[in-house]
Amino acid sequence: MRSIVDVVRTEDWGARPPTQSFEEQTPRFIIIHHTVTPNPPDDASGGTLDGAKELARRLQADHMERRGWADSGHNFLNTTGGFIVEGRHGTLAAIQRGRCVQSAHTVGANDSPGIENEGDFSIYEMDAEQWNSLVTLCAFICVSCHLDPEAIRGHRDFDATECPGDRLYAQLPRLRQDVRERQAAGVTFQVGRVEGRRVEDA
């Protein structure tokens, strides 16, 4: 069974160039975050591709201008419309090699990919479309980087934070199980490219 992982690349959402290059390391975890932005129907991206790109630009601007980071702090953004967006430059290519670019999302785990999930999951539960894209992305990373699904952790496991929200954090055992089942089904992954409204194999 083949599964397509459709990714909006940095060059396709108009990312600013990073202010430095990033080393690649062997990832140990997958770190789950939330953006603490409004949930549907007031979600920042509106569930659209154009909205996903605009949210990625907003997050990068915040990280570079307010936090002083060299690029987006996270490696991927998973929006309410189920769009997977590359965050930090070089992330996708590194993951495909079983590596991860040094990022800035979690103290003590910046050698590992961080996934920002659009929304505030303190009390809100992720809908099916966004959940499915999160499972697909995590399974792809696990396969590419030879990680066990038990390596999927919440931001709060490393830092004094409420991220990724009580509701999403409580669902991490289910996420690990869903990813494990996807792997057990013998799924192989092919990375696609979201460009405009079309998906092109890459």
Image: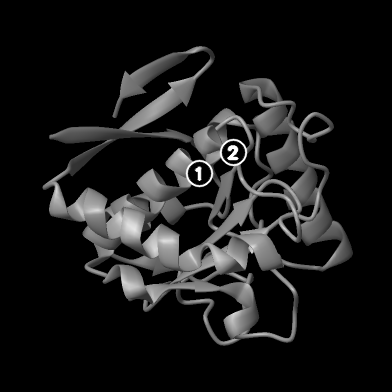
Indicate the position of residue 133 as horizontal and vertical percent values: 45, 40
Q: Is residue 25 visible?
A: no
Report the disc number at residue 131. 1
**Residue holding disc 2:** 127
Cα distance in 3D space between marks 1 and 2: 6 Å
Q: Residue furthest top?
A: 197
Question: Residue 24 falls in which quadrant of the image?
Answer: bottom left
- Which one is in front, 87 or 187? 187
Task: Report whether 177 appears left or right of 13.
Answer: left
Residue at 40 percent of width and 66 percent of height: 100
Residue 63 location (% of width, % of height): 77, 60
Q: Is residue 121 visible?
A: yes
- Vertical arrangement, residue 172 with respect to residue 110, above or below: above
In terms of depth relative to the viewer, which is nearer, 36 or 86? 36
- In this rendering, position of residue 73 left or right of residue 174: right
Q: Which quarter of the image is occupied by the C terminus? A: top left
Amino acid at pointer 2: Asp
Residue visible at 66% across and 56% down in the picture: 72
**Pointer 1 with pointer 2, Cβ within 8 A:** yes
Question: Which quarter shows the N terminus?
Answer: top left
Give the secondary structure at mark 1. helix
At x 50%, y 44%, the residue is: 131
Judging from the image, what secondary structure is the residue with disc 2 in? loop
- Bin the neighbour count of mark 1 within 10 Å (Cα to Cα): few under 14, some 14-19, many 20 and up: some
Tell me the quarter of the picture where residue 49 sits: top right
